[in-house]
Image (cartoon, rainbow, N blue to C red):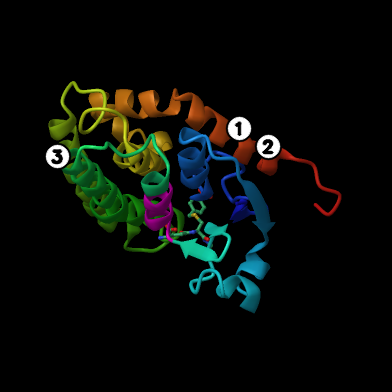
Amino acid sequence: MTITITAFERSPDGGKGLARDTRVRWALEEVGQPYEVRLVSFQAMKERAHLALNPFGQIPTYQEGDLTLFETGAIVFHIAERRAGLLPDDPNARARAITWMFAAVNTIEPPILELANARLLEGDKSWSKERLPLVEDRVRNRLKQLSHRLGDADWLDGAFSAGDLLMVSVLLRLKSSGILDEYPNLSAYLARGEARPAYKRAFAAQLAVNTAKSPTR
Ligand code: GTB
């Protein structure tokens, strides 16, 4: 059955792989599942047809036959459950990998997003200089805890899993900030994720979209 995901017609990051379709592409690449991509404009994302796929008017969405999904955590989980390669068979190891998926999107991603918003959207506010260090410290607090748990392991719990896929995806947002350099094992973890052939294919695919010439642009 054909799988179709949606992605930005043109991502604001110009193809750095930070838009969330990259993590879905990566999951599909890891399990060897071909997929199609439908590109949507910001305007189209807010229209009725797209809102039927994602009530929040966002990308990515995932369609497979009658099934429509949104929320990248749920999409990656669905892919990982149905195809081998992203979740261990052992029930306890599987439950732990799923725990790391939730930790990535629910515990680590929120302060990172808060920092991105503080820098990008609030940088010109009079109170921004006072607030920014607080927001950065919230990120550091979580990174310190994560770094401590990862230690010198390659991945968070045994073999690479969907938990690592989401955690690396979330940490990628910090790559240009310099904060990750304070945690060398997390920087190395990120680099290991980016070095995976499936990630490279996913990254290249989204980059191709964002660097393609278009007569309308
Ligand atoms: N919780 C949802 C999920 O995980 O699926 C969040 C989805 C989401 O935030 N989608 C964003 C979106 O559609 C794109 S990925 N935004 C448009 C809107 O809300 O109107 C977030 C994103 C966008 C751009 C960059 N960037 O340019 O660096 C990075 C990340």
Depth order, front residue of 90/35: 90
Q: Which label number is shown at residue 208?
A: 2
The answer to whether mark 3 is within 8 Å of ligand 1 is no
Residue 187 drawn at (x, y percent)? 32, 27
Residue 145's tag is: 3
User: Which label is found at residue 64?
Assistant: none
Q: CA distance from mark 2 to mark 1?
A: 6 Å
Q: Amino acid at mark 1?
A: Ala
Residue 134 vertical position relative to residue 84 in the rendered view, above or below: below
Give the percent coordinates (x, y) of residue 35. 61, 45
Report the magenta residues as a range: 71-79
| Quadrant in the picture for residue 183 | top left
Q: Residues within 10 Å of mark 3 (few under 14, many from 20)?
A: few
Image position of 175 with respect to 104: above or below: above
User: First in sequence: mark 3 or mark 1?
Assistant: 3
Give yes or no for residue 2 being in the magenta stretch. Answer: no
> Would you identify the image quadrant in which residue 161 lies?
top left
The residue carrying mark 2 has its beta carbon less than 8 Å from ligand 1:
no
Of tags 3 and 2, which is closer to the observer?
2
For disc 1, the marked residue is: 204
Depth check, front residue: 32 or 196: 32
Q: Secondary structure at mark 1?
A: helix
Q: Nearer the viewer, mark 3 or mark 1?
A: 1
